[in-house]
């Protein structure tokens, strides 16, 4: 049975879903997106994703096609129609289809934004076995554009980074700029030294991760020390442990960087404890 998807106000079988070839998301990567995880049939951190979406749209002067309440209703309807217990809801909004290709933005009063949502069924998402063994990362140069704080659909280089990691026998890549780690290809990056969690401070250099914000809040509530500053790959290799956070990976331990073992080479107690706390607290607050 095919999925039910949402396109510009309609719930449709995925085979019937269509977007114009002149849509600026297709021609210009002129669009933003969010991914919200689903656990137990409920949405995790929805409010944070909705607020970040509003910011991304505002930064790009792009019109919001629905309200926050309408967006929540659409998410819930798709989860119900597709019987998602564990998985994700993908949302994308573009500047729409002006009917031809032009670098200039179309008038939003004439060209409405395009909105698309679909679900991905991921049984066992929270019980990902990778969390028990950790992942391996490589370092690559960060050559993306300067507004990484806006969650745009410009994902070619992160995709290339994933493939570089795969070719090197690793799971992901950490991007490095001016000698310091910015973030992973689709996640925020952390190291742990003693009981101190170190992660890059928020700026236009990195995505303002929704899971990042929740995890750091939970860490502080658990009396863990958090230091928001840049760190190098060499410092990361000497750390006691390392991990990443994202909406789909939650908290994922990193056990190897560029072939060098991190700490004991096994998932560290801080990362595992934060994963446990995050999943517990997020399930309680899920909508």
Image (spheres, rainbow, N blue to C red):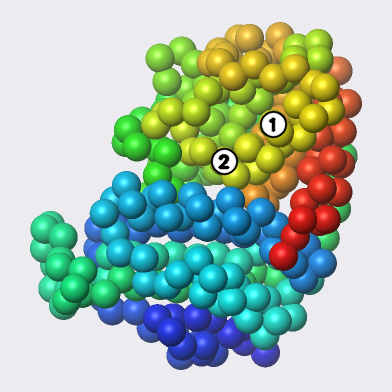
Residue 24 position in % (x across, y down): 25, 65
As rendered, which of 252 and 282 lies closer to the eye? 282
As rendered, which of 61 and 119 lies closer to the eye? 61
- Badge number at residue 209: 2
Q: Is residue 130 visible?
A: no
Label 1 to label 2: alpha-carbon separation? 11 Å
Residue 202 position in % (x across, y down): 49, 28
- Badge number at residue 83: none
Indicate the secondary structure of the residue bearing disc 2. loop
Task: Check the image and report above or below for 215 versus 240.
Answer: below
Residue 163 position in % (x across, y down): 52, 43
Task: Check the image and report above or below for 59 versus 116.
Answer: above
Relative side of 249 to 266, left or right: left
- Badge number at residue 216: 1
Q: Earlier in the sequence, mark 1 or mark 2?
A: 2
As rendered, which of 151 and 234 lies closer to the eye? 151
Relative side of 233 to 121, left or right: left
Rendered residue at 41%/49% (across/down): 55
Occupied quadrant, residue 1: bottom right
Which dot, 1 or 2, sits closer to the camera?
1
Rendered residue at 82%/48% (across/down): 281
As rendered, which of 287 and 99 lies closer to the eye? 287
Query: Are circles 1 and 2 on residues that touch, CB within 8 Å?
Result: no
Label 2 environment density (alpha carbons within 10 Å; few <14, some 14–19, many ≥20) = many
């Amino acid at each position: 049975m095919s999925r039910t998807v949402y396109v510009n106000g309609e719930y449709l079988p995925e085979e019937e879903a269509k977007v114009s070839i002149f849509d600026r998301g297709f021609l210009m990567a002129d669009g933003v997106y969010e991914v919200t995880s689903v656990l137990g049939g409920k949405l995790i951190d929805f409010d944070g994703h909705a607020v970040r979406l509003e910011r991304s749209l505002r930064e790009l002067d792009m019109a919001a096609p629905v309200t926050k309440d309408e967006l929540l209703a659409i998410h819930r309807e798709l989860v119900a129609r597709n019987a998602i217990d564990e998985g994700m809801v993908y949302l994308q909004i573009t500047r729409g289809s002006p009917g031809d290709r032009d670098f200039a933005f179309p008038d939003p009063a004439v060209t409405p934004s395009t909105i698309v949502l679909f679900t991905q069924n991921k049984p066992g998402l929270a019980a990902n076995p990778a969390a028990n063994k950790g992942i391996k990362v490589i370092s690559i140069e960060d050559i993306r554009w300067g507004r990484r704080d806006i969650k745009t659909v410009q994902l070619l280089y992160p995709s290339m980074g994933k493939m570089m990691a795969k070719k090197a026998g690793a799971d992901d890549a950490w991007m490095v700029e001016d000698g310091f780690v910015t973030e992973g290809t689709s996640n925020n990056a952390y190291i742990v030294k003693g009981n101190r969690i170190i992660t890059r401070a928020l700026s236009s250099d990195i995505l303002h991760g929704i899971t990042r914000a929740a995890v750091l809040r939970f860490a502080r509530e658990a009396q863990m020390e958090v230091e928001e500053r840049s760190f190098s790959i060499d410092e990361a290799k000497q750390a006691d442990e390392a991990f990443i956070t994202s909406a789909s990976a939650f908290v994922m331990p990193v056990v190897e960087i560029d072939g060098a073992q991190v700490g004991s080479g096994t998932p560290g107690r801080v990362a595992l404890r934060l994963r446990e706390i995050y999943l517990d607290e997020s399930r309680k607050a899920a909508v």
